[in-house]
Image (cartoon, rainbow, N blue to C red):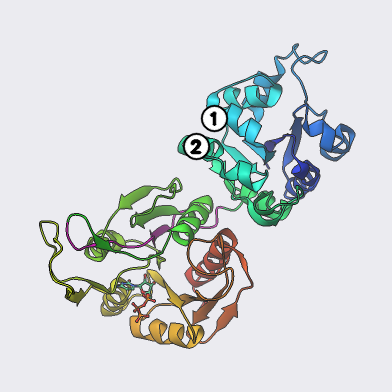
């Protein structure tokens, strides 16, 4: 059981905080609610008091609050500060170190882990100021939950909705060590595209954003795994992991993976690795002359197939090997062929032409394809797909023949 301060700031999603508080309690945690002045316009203080069975902290200026220097007392007694919903305003205050109310002072005063669930209008969420603040907070180790996309209370459609209370509760529960189901397991995850250089200016790349691989790495770290993340070129903020290795091309990625494969419990190849790279990398920029030019391409090493062969040679069942297949038609059948050819344990297959699936979006529609089983998952956030993949992995690590 952990003691969790639930910070609630003034957004329409504040009413969902009641369910978050209940969900955390159901998992056995002790919850103290901290409301900003504006949060009280959206949800009743009495409701939260009745549910948490603690006085709701709203201001450091209330009578009695200073007897125990309340924000310091609370700051040192909690295992997690969770802010849901986190408005643009409170995120800005956290990022800027402003402490003009109880919640922002608590953020500065606590050494406990901090998790925020941003929720606001899409344009506010996408504003560079807010994005910069989120990067700053993530850089300080604050866990930032991805807001959902959809119809928002303000009438706009887009990203900015508070994630479902159950998702917030799961994430917080994992962060306080309630579900360290992968503790002691070394998990290597690859993510993002590869860039294959043509000359010093140009390269061949692909549209992978790294979101799926980063979501898996984040989820595995949350479950207590020792995570090694090998990431191709992507602008996304990586999650906090044990080791982050930045690579560019397929050969460099293969070398980074093979050098770290020994001793891993699982390798998850979420990266979109180029199949071909220019046969030569011109040392100088190729100039413009002829009407047409031909670029000679050569096969790159197939990292997953190499890992499959390496594991077979050793007659070992570890590491568990998980591949991905982004297809454009006949996805499951093609995925199954890759599973067999590369000797993987299961392949996460998706059809990038389906709405809500594929690159550069937060959601995906995938089917997990194993040797003698299949599991089709409905459209959902990449973060929850990561959870489903790791649930399967845990079953495989548990020694079951069918993961
Ligand atoms: N993969 C790899 N090394 C490569 C190419 C792919 O390790 N050179 C991995 C990917 O990370 C993914 C899986 O293999 O986990 C399937 O990738 P995909 O590109 O779909 O498969 P290919 O074998 O390249 O087949 P094709 O491009 O013909 O569909």
Residue 285: x and y in percent read 14, 57
Residue 174: x and y in percent read 60, 50
Residue that appears at 50% across and 37% down: 132
Q: Earlier in the sequence, mark 2 or mark 1?
A: 1
Residue 402: x and y in percent read 52, 80
Q: Mark 2 and 1 residues: CB-CB less than 8 Å, in contact?
A: yes
Q: Write down the residue under mark 1.
A: 95
Question: The N terminus lies in which quarter of the figure?
Answer: top right
Residue that appears at 33% across and 55% down: 233
Q: Quadrant of residue 12?
A: top right
- Residue 289 part of the magenta-drawn span: no
Q: Write down the residue under mark 2.
A: 132
Q: Main secondary structure of the magenta part?
A: loop
Residue that appears at 30% across and 79% down: 312
Residue that appears at 55% across and 61% down: 382
Residue 376: x and y in percent read 60, 78
Up-down relation of residue 350 to residue 215 (above or below): below
Residue range highlighted in magenta = 180-199
- Total of numbered circles in the picture? 2
- Residue 192 part of the magenta-drawn span: yes
């Amino acid at each position: 059981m952990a003691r969790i301060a639930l910070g609630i700031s003034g957004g329409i999603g504040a009413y969902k905080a009641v369910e978050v508080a209940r969900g955390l309690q159901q998992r056995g945690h002790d919850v103290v609610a901290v409301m900003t002045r504006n949060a009280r316009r959206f949800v009743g203080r009495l409701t939260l008091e009745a549910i948490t069975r603690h006085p709701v902290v709203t201001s450091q200026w209330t009578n009695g609050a200073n007897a125990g220097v309340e924000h310091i007392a609370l700051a040192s007694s909690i295992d997690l500060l969770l802010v849901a919903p986190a408005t643009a305003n409170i995120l800005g205050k956290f990022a800027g170190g402003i402490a003009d109310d109880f919640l922002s002072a608590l953020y500065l005063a606590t050494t406990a882990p901090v998790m925020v669930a941003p929720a606001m209008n899409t344009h506010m969420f996408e504003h560079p100021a807010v994005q910069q603040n989120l990067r700053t907070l993530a850089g300080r180790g604050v866990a930032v939950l991805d807001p959902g996309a959809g119809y928002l209370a303000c009438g706009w459609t887009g990203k900015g909705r508070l994630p479902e209370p159950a998702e917030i509760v799961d994430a917080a529960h994992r962060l306080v060590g309630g579900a360290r189901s992968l503790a002691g397991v070394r998990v290597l995850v690859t993510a993002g595209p590869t860039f294959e250089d043509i000359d010093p200016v140009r390269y061949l790349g692909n549209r992978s954003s790294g979101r799926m691989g980063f979501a898996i790495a984040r989820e595995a770290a949350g479950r207590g795994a020792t995570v090694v993340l090998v990431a191709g070129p992507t602008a996304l903020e990586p999650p906090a992991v044990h080791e982050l290795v930045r690579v560019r091309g397929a050969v460099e990625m293969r070398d980074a993976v093979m050098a770290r494969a020994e001793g891993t419990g699982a390798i998850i190849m979420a990266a979109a690795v180029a199949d071909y790279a220019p046969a030569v990398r011109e040392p100088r920029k190729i100039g413009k002359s002829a009407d047409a030019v031909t670029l000679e391409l050569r096969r790159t090493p197939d990292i997953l197939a190499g890992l499959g062969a390496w594991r077979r040679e050793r007659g070992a069942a570890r590491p568990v090997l998980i591949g991905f297949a982004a297809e454009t038609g006949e996805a499951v059948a093609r995925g199954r062929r890759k599973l067999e050819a590369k000797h993987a344990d299961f392949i996460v297959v998706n059809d990038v032409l389906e709405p809500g699936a594929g690159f550069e979006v937060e959601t995906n529609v995938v089917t997990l394809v194993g040797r003698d089983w299949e599991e089709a998952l409905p459209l959902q956030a990449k973060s929850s797909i990561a959870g489903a993949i790791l649930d399967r992995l845990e079953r495989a690590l548990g020694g079951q023949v069918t993961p």
